[in-house]
Image (cartoon, grey):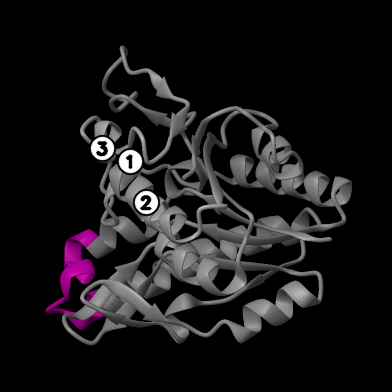
Amino acid sequence: MSELVFLKLGGSLITEKSREATARPEVLQRLAREIKSALAARPDLQLLIGHGSGSFGHVLAHRYHVHTGCADWWGYAATSAIAARLNRLVTDAFLAEGVAVVSLQPSASARCRGGQLLEMTVAPIQAALEHGLAPLVYGDVAFDEAQGSTIISTEQIFSYLAGILAPTRIILAGEVDGVFTSDPARDAAASLIPDISRRNLDYVKGMLAGSAAVDVTGGMLSKVLTMFELIRERPSLKVRLISGLRFGWVQRALQDAEFREGTLLHW
């Protein structure tokens, strides 16, 4: 039987998040090679890939308040274009390493209300998976029925798609090794939380902080809460947060469901 896994490459991982519109091509190349190796080792693996916008989308979105309903619609258009520009870089890097990704623009079909993703077209994603391709989605702008415009994060897209496609695992690869007691970029005493479940979620929530850079999708706390709501609905789902900067971690996490590095979110 095949296994469907969702993999997110965080914006802080694939871009220089403190420098506007600056990608990390060497990181993208290495990640593409790791993913190619994992798919070669696991022919039964179906993979849906998503990525954040990092210093491409977040800076413009924050400048023009796209996430809360922009007054200047030029900002919406510019944010859409720069998010797509990063997606093109990711797509090209993966194709160059032999990973058969197919880019699918979320905003082309997303319907949102009050910052929540209500629906988006799934049929092209299903068709890509059926043909052995890896659908590639990304954090994007979207029209919003209540506030005019919003930003839909990759986690929101994953959450919506998981209810239809039913992945067994979700892997979120960022800069840091997982979820920490405080922001490791600011606090040298921060320690890794290896396991988050319904038993310690409330305790963990009090320790989580936002990102050290501009992030209009809410930082680590938002990521954990969005994923845990999904786990609440699908108790068999496992979500693992890992560092994509650690050599080989993405490949090992894709190949091995029992991979134990990082932080595991489960029911």
Question: Label 2's element?
Answer: helix
Residue 9's spot in the image, x, y percent? Answer: 54, 49
Residue 228's spot in the image, x, y percent? Answer: 39, 50
State the residue lying farthest toward the top: 189
Write down the region rendered in magenta. 62-75
**Counting residues from the N terminus, which is met first, the one under dot 1 or under dot 3?**
1
- Residue 34 visible: yes
- Asked whether the beta carbons under mark 1 and mark 2 sit within 8 Å of each other, the answer is yes
Residue under label 1 = 18
Residue under label 3 = 202
**Counting residues from the N terminus, which is met first, the one under dot 2 or under dot 3?**
2
Residue at the location (25% across, 47% down)?
A: 214
Question: Label 3's element?
Answer: helix
Disc 1/disc 2 C-alpha distance (Å) = 7 Å
Residue 167's spot in the image, x, y percent? Answer: 62, 61
Residue at the location (37% across, 46% down)?
A: 224
